[in-house]
C-alpha cells in the first residue's frame, strides 16, 4: 500500500473522528458520564448496532447503578427479548439499589408475562407506581387481570386507566382513535374472547390504509411473519417453557382475532 493511499485513509479517519467528536462528544462534554453513555447508545442504535448499544448501557448500569434514566432507556430499546432472565435481573438489581417505582413497574410487566402475578401486584401498589404507569402509558393492572383469566376485570381496568388519561373524552372513539393497533388490540381481543361487541373498538382505527402502516391489516401481516420466528432462551426464573407457551398462545389468539377482523371488514 502506497504512502499516498495510507495518508488519504488516515485523513478520512481523522475527518470522521472529528465529526463524531464535534457532533456527539463536545456538545455533551460537561454532562454526566452516564448521560453521555445514553447518547453513545443512541448513536449506535441509529446506525443499527443494537447489540453494541445494549452493551454500552449495560456497562453504564454497572458503573452507575443509581442512574435510573439509564435503566429506562435500556428498557425502551433492549434488543434481546428472548433472554428474559438477563433483562429481569438487570432491573431487579437496579430496583434493589434505588427502589425506583418506575423500575418496579417495568419488573411487574415482565412478571405478569411470566405468570407471577402476586409479585407483580406488589410492585404496582404504591401511588408512585400508579403515577408512573399513567405517565408512561402502561396499563399493567389490566394486563395482570388478563393474565389471571379475569377478562371482565381486565376490560374494566383498561377502560378506567385511559379514562383517567383522557378525562375530557366523550366516548371510546375519542380516546382510542390516536392509538396504534398494537396498543388497542388488547381491548379488542378481550371483547372478542368475551363475545362482546369488538367491532366498535376495531372501527376506531383503519383496517387497511394506503397512506400509513398503522392499520389492522399491517399488524395482522406482521404477526404472521413473527409467529414462526418466536423464540425464548430463558424465562425470568430460568426455564423458558412457560413464557414461550404464553407468548405462543398470545400471538395465536391475536392472529385468529385479526383473521375475523379481516373477514368482517374486508
Image: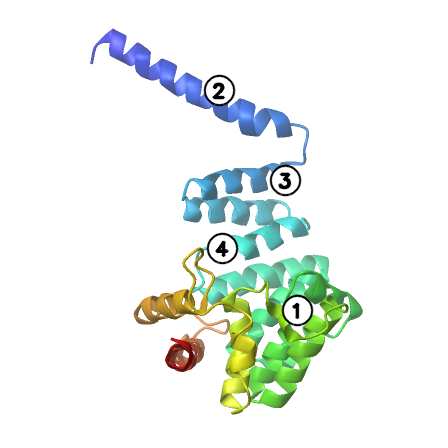
Tell me the distance, in whole angstroms, between the alpha carbons under discs 2 and 4. Answer: 29 Å
Q: Which of 21 and 224 is in front in this view?
A: 224
* Residue topped by disc 2: 18
Residue pictured at 66% horizontal, 69% vertical = 175
Are discs 2 and 4 less than 8 Å apart at CB?
no
* Residue topped by disc 1: 174
Q: Nearer the viewer, residue 61 or 39?
A: 39
Residue 58 pos. (x, y %): 53, 49
* Residue topped by disc 4: 78
Point out the tag, 2 or 4, that comes first from the N-terminus.
Answer: 2
Residue pictured at 56% horizontal, 59% vertical = 90
- Tell me: 103 left or right of 219: right
Residue pictured at 52% horizontal, 74% vertical = 203
Which one is in front in this view, the residue at disc 4 or the one at disc 1? 1
Point out the tag, 3 or 2, that comes first from the N-terminus.
Answer: 2
Category of crowding for the residue at label 2, using alpha-carbon neighbours closer than 10 angstroms: few (below 14), some (14–19), many (at least 20): some
Which one is in front in this view, the residue at disc 1 or the one at disc 2? 1
29, above or below 182, in the image: above
Category of crowding for the residue at label 3, using alpha-carbon neighbours closer than 10 angstroms: few (below 14), some (14–19), many (at least 20): some
Tell me the distance, in whole angstroms, between the alpha carbons under discs 4 and 1. Answer: 32 Å
Tell me the distance, in whole angstroms, between the alpha carbons under discs 3 and 2. Answer: 21 Å
- Tell me: 261 left or right of 174: left
Residue 265 pos. (x, y %): 42, 77
Residue pictured at 48% horizontal, 49% vertical = 54
Amino acid at each position: 500500500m502506497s504512502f499516498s493511499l495510507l495518508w488519504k485513509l488516515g485523513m478520512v479517519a481523522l475527518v470522521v473522528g472529528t465529526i463524531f467528536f464535534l457532533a456527539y462528544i463536545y456538545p455533551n462534554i460537561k454532562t454526566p458520564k452516564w448521560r453521555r453513555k445514553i447518547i453513545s447508545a443512541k448513536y449506535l442504535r441509529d446506525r443499527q448496532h443494537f447489540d453494541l448499544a445494549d452493551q454500552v448501557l449495560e456497562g453504564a448500569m454497572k458503573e452507575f447503578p443509581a442512574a435510573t434514566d439509564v435503566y429506562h432507556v435500556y428498557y425502551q430499546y433492549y434488543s434481546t427479548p428472548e433472554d428474559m432472565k438477563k433483562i429481569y435481573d438487570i432491573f431487579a438489581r437496579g430496583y434493589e439499589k434505588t427502589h425506583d417505582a418506575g423500575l418496579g413497574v417495568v419488573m411487574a410487566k415482565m412478571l405478569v408475562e411470566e405468570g407471577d402475578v402476586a409479585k407483580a401486584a406488589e410492585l404496582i401498589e404504591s401511588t408512585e407506581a400508579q403515577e408512573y404507569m399513567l405517565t408512561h402509558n402502561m396499563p399493567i393492572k389490566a394486563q395482570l387481570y388478563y393474565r389471571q383469566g379475569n377478562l371482565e376485570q381486565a376490560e374494566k381496568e383498561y377502560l378506567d386507566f385511559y379514562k383517567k388519561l383522557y378525562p375530557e373524552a366523550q366516548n371510546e372513539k375519542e380516546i382510542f382513535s390516536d392509538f396504534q393497533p398494537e396498543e388497542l388490540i388488547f381491548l379488542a381481543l378481550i371483547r372478542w374472547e368475551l363475545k362482546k361487541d369488538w367491532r366498535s373498538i376495531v372501527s376506531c382505527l383503519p383496517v387497511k390504509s394506503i397512506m400509513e402502516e398503522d392499520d389492522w391489516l399491517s399488524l395482522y401481516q406482521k404477526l404472521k411473519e413473527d409467529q414462526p420466528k418466536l423464540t425464548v432462551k430463558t424465562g425470568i426464573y430460568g426455564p423458558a417453557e412457560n413464557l414461550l407457551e404464553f407468548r405462543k398462545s398470545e400471538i395465536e389468539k391475536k392472529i385468529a382475532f385479526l383473521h375475523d377482523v379481516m373477514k368482517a371488514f374486508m
